[in-house]
Image (tube, rainbow, N blue to C red):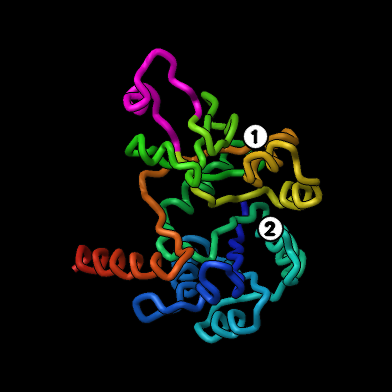
Amino acid sequence: MTKYIAIIPARYASTRFPGKPLAILGGKPVIQRVYEQVTSVLDTAYVATDDARIYEAVTAFGGKAVMTRTDHKSGTDRIEEAIEKIGSDADVVVNIQGDEPFIHPSQIQTLCHCFDDSETQIATLGKPFDSMAAVENPNSPKIAVSNKGFALYFSRSVIPFVRGAERTEWLTHYPYLKHLGIYAYRREVLRAITRLPQSSLEIAESLEQLRWLQNGYTIKVGTTDIETVGIDTPDDLKRAEDFLKQQEHLER
């Protein structure tokens, strides 16, 4: 049976919202909400941080945390260091961002089920776009997927180009898929990809996953209909508070 471990990278420093993992959302720190969502599905989870304040907050609510270096260039590198420090024997490492308090248990399950396919080396999630305006947004990368469910390419550009149709009608001709930045990796693959140099496609699009694709790694794409609500700015936190109130109202 495949053994999973979740690592939640959480940094204190952020240009747009310093200290966001410790921001209070509905009476709890954001990082606690992420941790509780993750541990509702996976038995083992650690927060990987480079700041003692986050480490102490996690251990205070009964969570597990590991201190990592401050000089990592990416979250993937931080996860690799954390796994080395923990000494985990897990087969698959699940990476959930520390600013995703509404990650849904079903999304984590979908991600894990991607590894039922022995060809899967890395897994991620995609969600169908619901408007052409959203498809046009370069901050929402698009995924082109093979018939077997593996990523062919990720792009900030609108891919594919629908020939012979008005651009406003493209979504009725092709099911554009939005990339959600949630990943899982086979243990040995995680170790290998953190040793790769940056690739030309990655540099061009500023998308780390293109480094892995360009080096021949397979990325299975699970699909979800649930939108995640990430927190990058104080305004996002306000929106998250409203979203939480809506959820609580629906559950009553």
Q: Residue at x 64, y 73 (%)?
A: 49
Residue 207 in magenta stretch:
no
**Residue type for callout 1:** Glu
In the image, 102: left or right of 1? left
**Residue type for callout 2:** Ser
Does label 1 or label 2 sit earlier along the sequence? Answer: 2
Q: Give the x, y percent position of residue 157.
A: 52, 34
Which circle, 1 or 2, is nearer the viewer?
2
- When asked about the image quadrant of residue 167, the answer is top left
Q: CA distance from mark 1 to mark 2?
A: 25 Å
Q: Residue at x 36, y 38 (%)?
A: 133
Where's the C terminus, which quadrant? bottom left
In the image, 146: left or right of 210? left
- Label count reads 2
Mark 1 burial class by Cα count in 10 Å: few <14, some 14-19, many 20+: few
In the image, 19: left or right of 52? left
Q: Residue at x 50, y 42 (%)?
A: 138
> Where is 177 relative to 86, above or below?
above
Badge 2 element: loop
User: Which residue is denoted by mark 1 in the rendering?
Assistant: 119
- When asked about the image quadrant of residue 243, the answer is bottom left
Give 202 or 91, whichever is nearer the viewer.
202
Residue farthest toward the top in the current orientation of the protein: 164
Mark 2 burial class by Cα count in 10 Å: few <14, some 14-19, many 20+: few
Badge 1 element: loop
Q: Give the x, y percent position of residue 1.
A: 61, 50
User: Which residue is denoted by mark 2 in the rendering?
Assistant: 74
| Residue numbers of the magenta segment | 159-177
Give 206 or 96, whichever is nearer the viewer.
206
